[in-house]
């Protein structure tokens, strides 16, 4: 904990000491020094207003240091306006808790981010172990061909498991169901199958690249893990200020996947496709989307495909703040968005396969019992 208020520190100590070992710093610079001490902290609570350096400056320093960059930072502050929250998230913090601190809320936030940290570390270690195993096996020249085949199979399996695991993590923080992940992935696969034989893509996009696109679709909303609960789980329409915070999730998702790719040595692998999808699936063909407002073919193809899949599924699905729309209504809405919201050529593909979309929606319809979601996701891969 980095905070200079004795009263606040006493409250935090009473809340956290029954569950965690705590280090305390009352100055920002001392906190940065303590953050580098072994064993490294699992999470840092950081006051925004400190006597020596601003909390935002301390956060930037933590994120720029390779030793501390992966440590989750939660800001503590009496400044609870949307501008301060958004700025804190943009600097790399995972959450923003307002003072005075409410014990159950703080504990829940801390436990959530510690679970996410452990899951991320587990996935990274699994990939590192797998890469090490593959390198060892391929060192035997006499069995190089057989080992290479196993390497490909194991690496693809690792990628698939990573995507399912990360997609499931994102799902646990959202009101959407695991069936949404299954449906949108299947919709994107249908679009990919329609595009692949076309002349314009036949010589530029390989079968493996099409496969990477639809297999990466479950990660489109991974950035929502960084959106505060009171906004992400709000059972109604967001205010303008809340929506500005929600619009940060493509940026959070892109940055998380970029860091994950560098961390496991797969910067140019399937995660690059997932990064395009996470960052670009709310852009619009006419340039009125977000986060950048890019338009046309400047939007990655994978993101344009995801946009149609995500919007269609959102329309036909029931949410706490809206009823499900009929399939026919969704078709007309996407047809009306041709050249505006959506890539015209992809709308044409969608219209040709609209019946297939309807079948997928029926096959993976939302139900109360979703205990088999992860198993189904693995089977699909």
Image (spheres, helix red, strand yellow):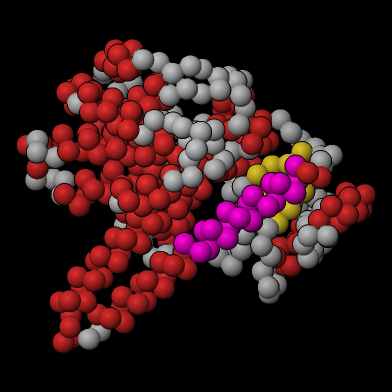
Q: Position of residue 333 (x, y in %)?
A: 33, 14
Magenta segment main secondary structure: helix
133 to 339, vertically: above or below = below
The image quarter containing residue 214 is top left
How many numbered marks are there? Answer: 0
Front position in the image: 315 or 356: 356
Q: Quadrant of the N terminus?
A: bottom right
Q: Position of residue 7 (x, y in %)?
A: 93, 49
Front position in the image: 65 or 35: 35
**What range of the chain is rendered magenta?**
105-123
264 to 380, vertically: above or below = below
Q: Is residue 307 magenta?
A: no
Look at 69% across and 46% down and name the residue there.
109
Q: Position of residue 16 (x, y in %)?
A: 81, 56
Look at 46% across and 32% down and name the residue there.
367
Look at 13% across and 45% down and name the residue there.
204
């Amino acid at each position: 904990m980095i905070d200079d208020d004795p009263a606040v520190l006493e409250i935090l100590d009473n809340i956290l000491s029954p569950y965690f070992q705590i280090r305390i710093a009352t100055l920002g610079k001392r906190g940065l020094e303590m953050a580098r001490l072994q064993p490294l902290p699992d999470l840092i609570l950081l006051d925004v207003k400190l006597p020596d350096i601003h909390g935002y400056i301390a956060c930037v320093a933590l994120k720029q240091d390779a030793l501390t960059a992966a440590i989750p930072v939660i800001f503590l502050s009496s400044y609870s306006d949307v501008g301060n929250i958004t700025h804190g998230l943009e600097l790399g913090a995972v959450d923003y808790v307002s003072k005075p601190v409410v014990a159950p809320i703080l504990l829940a936030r801390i436990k959530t981010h510690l679970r996410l940290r452990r899951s991320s570390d587990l996935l990274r270690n699994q990939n590192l172990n797998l890469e090490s195993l593959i390198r060892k096996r391929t060192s035997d020249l006499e069995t190089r061909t057989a080992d290479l085949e196993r390497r490909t199979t194991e690496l693809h399996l690792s990628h698939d498991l990573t995507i399912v695991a990360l997609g499931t993590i994102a799902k646990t923080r959202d009101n959407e169901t695991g069936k949404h992940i299954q449906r949108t992935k299947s919709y994107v696969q249908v679009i990919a199958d329609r595009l692949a034989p076309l002349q314009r893509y036949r010589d530029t996009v390989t079968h493996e690249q099409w496969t990477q696109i639809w297999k990466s679709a479950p990660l489109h909303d991974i950035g929502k893990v960084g959106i505060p609960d009171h906004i992400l789980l709000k059972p109604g329409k967001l205010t303008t200020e809340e929506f500005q915070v929600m619009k940060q999730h493509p940026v959070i998702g892109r940055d998380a996947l970029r860091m994950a790719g560098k961390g496991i040595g797969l910067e140019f692998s399937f995660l690059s496709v997932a990064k395009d999808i996470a960052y670009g699936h709310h852009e619009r063909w006419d340039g009125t989307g977000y986060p950048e407002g890019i338009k046309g073919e400047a939007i990655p193809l994978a993101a344009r495909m995801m946009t149609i899949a995500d919007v269609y599924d959102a329309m036909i699905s029931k949410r706490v703040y809206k009823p499900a729309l009929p399939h026919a209504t969704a078709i007309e809405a996407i047809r009306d968005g041709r050249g505006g919201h959506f890539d015209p050529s992809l709308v044409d593909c969608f219209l040709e396969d609209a019946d297939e979309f309807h079948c997928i929606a029926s096959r993976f319809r939302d139900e109360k019992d979703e205990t088999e979601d992860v198993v189904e996701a693995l089977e699909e891969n």
